[in-house]
Image (cartoon, helix red, strand yellow):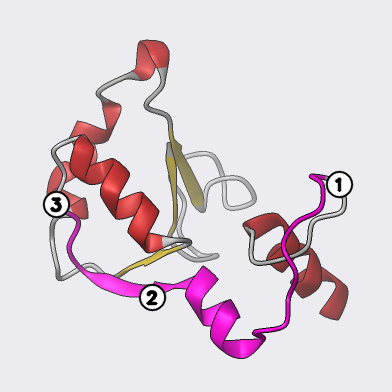
Amino acid sequence: CLSIYSGPDFDYGLGLEKGSVLWIDNLDDAYGVLQYFKDWLQDERYLKVWHNYGFDRHVLWNEGINVQGFGGDTMHMARLQDTSRSKATSFKNATGYGLEALSNDLLEMR
């Protein structure tokens, strides 16, 4: 699966509170849905920000999608910002560079 965030003012038809994120599932009955987004994912004009780009690119490559338009990798940006984060010890006690841990830290800072 993957998610697309298009900013706070973009609406995918669910209203602005829920509509600025598009969740794309590709599991079980939804297998093949990613192919509908292939042209966009392969278009270098649209910059995409990833979390662990190397893994995501490999998975999408296995689906026949050659991702273009690299805009950044949040996991690697976090590593550059703070190299001392420890690895996750459990799901609830998230640390390290996972999305949950980084998101929790951001929310605490706000």
Badge 3 local density, few (<14 within 10 Å), some, or many (20+)?
some
Q: Is residue 110 visible?
A: no
Q: Measuring 71% from the left and 56% from the top, which residue is drawn there?
A: 100
Q: Are marks 3 and 1 in contact (CB under 8 Å)?
A: no
Q: Does the magenta portion include 34?
A: no
Label 1 vs 2, first from the N-terminus: 2
Alpha carbon distance from label 3 to label 1? 34 Å
Alpha carbon distance from label 1 to label 2? 27 Å
Q: Between residues 21 and 25, which one lies in front from this camera angle?
A: 25
> Which mark is on residue 92?
1
In the picture of the structure, the residue carrying the numbered disc 2 is: 72
Q: Is residue 14 visible?
A: yes
> Which mark is on residue 66?
3
Label 3 vs 1, first from the N-terminus: 3
Disc 1, SS: loop
Q: How many numbered tags mark residues here?
A: 3
Instruction: Identify the residue at the far bottom of this view.
Output: 81
Q: Using residue 39 as the reference point, say whether residue 16 is left or right of it.
A: right
Q: Using residue 37 as the reference point, say whether residue 98 is left or right of it.
A: right
**Which amino acid type corresponds to the residue marked 2 in the rendered image?**
Gly
Residue 91 point in image, percent of width and height: 79, 44
Query: What range is drawn magenta here?
Result: 67-91
Badge 1 local density, few (<14 within 10 Å), some, or many (20+)?
few
Q: Measuring 84% from the left and 80% from the top, which residue is drawn there?
A: 109
